[in-house]
Image (tube, grey):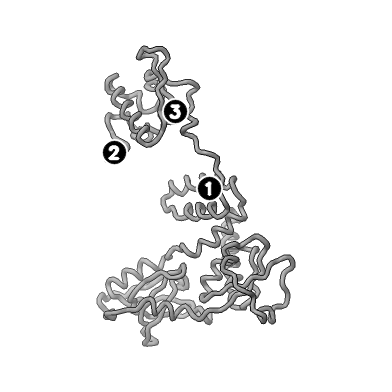
Amino acid sequence: MSDDLPVSEPAGPGVPPAERLLNLVIALVNTSVSMSKQQIRRGVAGYGDAPSSEAFERMFERDKDTLRGLGVPVVTVDAGGHSDDVGYRIDNEAYALPPVDLTPAELGVLALAAQLWGDTALRTDSSRAMTKLRAAGSAEAEADALAGLAPRVRAAGDAYAPLLDAVTERRLVRFRYRAASTGVLADRLVEPWRIAARGGGWYLVGRDVDRAAPRVFRLSRIEGRVRVGAEAGAFDIPAHVDVDAALGAGAGHERTAVLAVVPERASAVRARAVPVPDDALGGVAVVPEGRDVVAVPFTSVTTLAEELAGYADAVVVLAPSELRAEVVRLLQAAAGLDTLGGGRG
C-alpha cells in the first residue's frame, strides 16, 4: 500500500482513494471562496458514504495531509473563529504552473518521451498534454527535433523476443533477411550468440550456418516471423564473443552523404555537417532551388535513411544513390500505411 495514498476508511462503492483525492482537488480549485467540511462531505464524491461523522473527519484529515505532502497547497480559511465556519481551498497562484516557454529542441524531446509510453491510459494522457504543449512552439521545429532524436531510441521490434529466447536456450533460428548491400531477401539459418544495440539499431550476432561464418544481422531488416528450432542446446556459444568488434566490422566504412536542406530546418543533421567535397555534386543533375547543400558523414545506409525520412520533404538526398533509394522506399512505405488507414492522422 502506498504511503502517498493511504486507505483510512471505506470511500463508498466504486470510488477508490486516488479518485477521491482528485475529486477533492477539483472541488477546492474551483470553489469561489472556500468549502466547509459539511459542503465537502455533501458535494465531493467519495465522502458522502462515510459511515459516521467521525469516519468522515478521519478520512478528510488524512486526505488533506496527503495532498499537502504531495505539494498541493491546501489552505485553511477561518471566517469567524467558530469551527463550523472554517473552510478550505487551494491557493491557485501557488498551485498554477508558470508560463510554459519551451525551445523547439525541448519540445521535441518531450514529444519523443511521449511516444515511449506503452500503457493505453498513459498514452492518451501524454497525447493530450503534447497537444497543449505544441501551442508553445513551432510544429515544424518540434518535428525536426523529434526526427533528429528518434533513430537513437528505436524499438527492438517483433524479432527481439524470440531471438532473445533462442540465445538463452541455444536454439537455431530461421528468418527472412534483406541484405543491406544488395536489398536481396533470402532465408538465413543462424546460431544466435548475442543481441546488442548500436547506433540506434538492434543487432543479432551469430553464426550463419549456410555460410559457415559469423555474421551480424540488423533486426529491422528481418521480415516476417522468426522461426525458432525445437531442440534446446543445439549448438555451443563461443566462450568469448567480441560484440564490439563484430558490430564495428558490420558498420562499414565511413562515407559522405550530400543533402539539399530547407533553410533553418534539420538542425540535428546540420550539427554533424562537414565541408562539402569538391566532387560531391559531379553526378547530381539538379540541386533544388532555395535549399542549402549539406554534407554529413555516415556508415550505415539504413540508420541515416531512417533519420532523414523523418524530415519528410525538408531534406532531399542528392548522393549517394543507394541512400536516396532507401529514403524513397521508406517514404513510400509510410505513404502506403497512410492510404491503408484512410488518411487519418
Q: Is residue 324 visible?
A: no
> Looking at this rendering, what residue extends furthest in the left direction?
233
Q: Position of residue 154 (x, y in %)?
A: 46, 63
Closer to us: 225 or 65: 65
Question: Please, what secondary structure does the residue beneath circle 2 have?
Answer: loop
Alpha-carbon distance for marks 3 and 2?
A: 22 Å
Residue 172 relative to residue 137: left or right: left
Residue at x 58%, y 57% (from the top left corner)? 143
Residue flagged by tag 2: what amino acid is it?
A: Asp
Residue 166 relative to residue 72: left or right: left
Q: Earlier in the sequence, mark 3 or mark 2?
A: 2
Q: Quadrant of residue 255?
A: bottom right
Q: Is residue 253 above or below residue 50?
A: below
Q: Quadrant of the N terminus?
A: top left
**What residue is disc 1 on?**
130
Label of residue 3 in the image = 2
Q: Is residue 267 visible?
A: yes
Q: Earlier in the sequence, mark 2 or mark 1?
A: 2
Residue 194 relative to residue 329: left or right: left
Alpha-carbon distance for marks 2 and 1?
A: 30 Å
